[in-house]
């Protein structure tokens, strides 16, 4: 059953989430480790109502240089099952939500260099 909040049909737009500004990822934020950065974004995503996945990681040797973390429903994939046989032939929403992080080797920290919050 859908409900209306301010005239918005929740079945169409999904639930509305309000996330405290202190938990929102911003360009220029720095973290001590890659894990801390990913955990911060994962916590934001959970509060905002979506899940994340690592889309790509670039390395030089064994050392990680940068990483792109996106909404888990970022891509629109086509099903391998013939569309007539499958009720939902595609998954994903082409969601643009993501952060791009890279290492600041001279400082030994990680910085968020790109943020797309729209989900």
Image: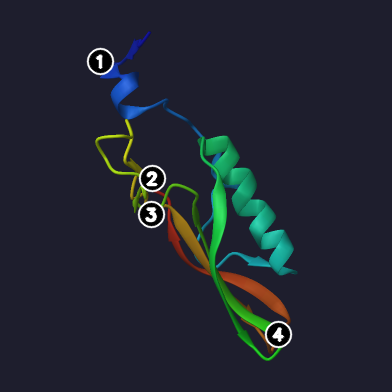
Closer to the observer: label 3 or label 4? 3
Nearer to the camera, 86 or 31: 86
Residue drawn 29% across the image and 25% down it: 12
Query: What is the x, y in percent for residue 101?
Result: 56, 70
User: Is the C-beta separation of discs 3 and 4 under 8 Å?
Assistant: no
Where is 49 relative to 6, above or below? below
Of callouts 3 and 4, the N-terminal one: 4
Q: Distance between the residues labelled 3 and 2?
A: 6 Å
The secondary structure type at the circle numbered 1 is: loop
Closer to the observer: label 1 or label 4? 4
Q: Distance between the residues labelled 1 and 2?
A: 26 Å
User: Is the C-beta separation of discs 3 and 2 under 8 Å?
Assistant: yes
Q: What label does residue 63 carry, if any?
A: 4
Residue at numbered disc 1: 7
Of callouts 1 and 3, the N-terminal one: 1
Closer to the observer: label 4 or label 2? 2
Residue at numbered disc 2: 92
Q: Distance between the residues labelled 1 and 4?
A: 50 Å
The secondary structure type at the circle numbered 4 is: strand
Q: Distance between the residues labelled 3 and 4?
A: 27 Å
User: Is the C-beta separation of discs 1 and 4 under 8 Å?
Assistant: no
């Amino acid at each position: 059953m859908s409900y209306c909040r301010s005239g918005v049909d929740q079945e169409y737009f999904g639930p509305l989430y309000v996330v405290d500004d202190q938990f929102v990822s911003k360009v220029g934020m720095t973290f001590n480790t890659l894990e801390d950065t990913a955990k911060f974004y994962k916590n934001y995503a959970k509060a905002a109502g979506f899940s994340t996945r690592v889309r790509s990681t670039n390395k030089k040797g064994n050392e990680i240089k940068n990483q792109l973390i996106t909404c888990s429903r970022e891509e629109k994939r086509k099903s391998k099952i013939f569309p007539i046989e499958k009720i939902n032939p595609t998954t994903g929403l082409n969601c643009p939500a993501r952060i791009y992080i890279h290492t600041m080797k001279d400082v030994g920290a990680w910085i968020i260099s790109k943020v797309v919050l729209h989900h």
